[in-house]
Image (cartoon, rainbow, N blue to C red):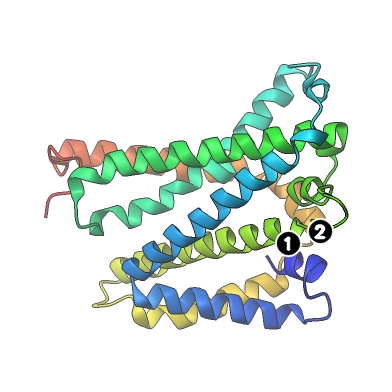
Amino acid sequence: MGDLMLTYIIPETPLVVIAIIFIVLAGWITRKGLEVLARFAFVAVAIVSAMIVATFILLIPQMDATNFLPILDIPPKDFIQGVHIAVAIPICEVMAFMMIIPYVNSAKQVKKSFLLGCTAGVITLLVDAIRNIAVLGPLYAISISPSIDAVRLIDIANILTRLEVLVITALVLMLFFKTSVLFYSVVLGIAQTFRLPSYAPMVFPVGALVIINSLLGESNVEQFYVAANMWPFYATIYEFVIPAVSLIIAMIRGLTNKTGGISE
């Protein structure tokens, strides 16, 4: 997030300032509760969806169907690794919503809403990838920010240009929402583990730790390497194994009810 802002928007701003502002806002929306977070998500999803549709339409003249050829011209090992990365990082991170689902007002609509949201998210990622590959071709594989590079090519009569700011805005909104959900899940999990009456006291210390970690973290190159070669295997434990074991234990203990929720 900080590197994105420094590279494309405010290059002269210290990283610590961006991190503090970002985490303070995420902490504020976390303290306000799920209702505020849900309202922000509705607005953010509408803006991002409109951006993707608009940029896809504007880039149709520059798309080349031959950029998709040859199909499956990679070793099976690389294909499986790519699918594993795509599943572990953007898709299965929805497991964080498991901390939120027990607190929704209508438990009967949880399953339908959750599956609908996951389907919409996968379709959005697919449309975004199709747009970028059709426009960039081989450059897609080496681009650090393919969405930004693709949308940057939009030029209508030398008037409608530099629309990559739309992509950056969408990325900031989605990263903020993702951070807020993970923030809420972490502080709520800590509060439940230590049987605290409220998660609010944990917002400040957790936020401080996040800021410190962001300033001491690896470079972009190291993060990309970890994301491609290490994190998917590490994340499998938390995104597949632990949820599956928890579900099996809940079923054995009879904690699940007919509506799919958790009985009190």
Mark 2 belongs to which amino acid?
Arg
Q: Nearer the viewer, residue 123 or 64?
A: 64
Name the spot of residue 173 as percent of width and height, x first.
Answer: 57, 63
Residue 8 occupies which quadrant of the picture? bottom right
User: CB atoms at circles 1 and 2 under 8 Å apart?
Assistant: yes
Residue 254 occupies which quadrant of the picture? top left
Residue 75 occupies which quadrant of the picture? top right
From where the camera sits, is residue 247 visible?
yes
Name the spot of residue 13 as percent of width and height, x first.
Answer: 78, 81
Relative to 126, does residue 44 appear above or below in the rendering?
below
From where the camera sits, is residue 237 visible?
no
The residue located at (84%, 47%) in the rendering is 153
Relative to 185, does residue 197 appear above or below in the rendering?
below
Q: Nearer the viewer, residue 108 or 213?
A: 108
User: Does residue 259 appear to the left or right of 83 in the view shown?
Assistant: left
Name the spot of residue 60 as percent of width and height, x first.
Answer: 74, 35
For label 1, the crowd category at 10 Å Cα-Cα, with few meaning under 14, some 14 to 19 and many 20 or more, is some
For label 2, the crowd category at 10 Å Cα-Cα, with few meaning under 14, some 14 to 19 and many 20 or more, is some
Q: Label 2: state its secondary structure.
A: loop
The residue located at (53%, 81%) in the rendering is 24
The residue located at (19%, 52%) in the rendering is 106
Q: Label 1: state its secondary structure.
A: helix
The residue located at (13%, 41%) in the rendering is 257
The numbered mark at residue 165 is: 1
Name the spot of residue 50 as percent of width and height, x first.
Answer: 57, 50
User: Does residue 193 appear to the left or right of 262 in the view shown?
Assistant: right
Residue picked out by circle 2: 162
Spatial CA span between label 1 and label 2: 7 Å
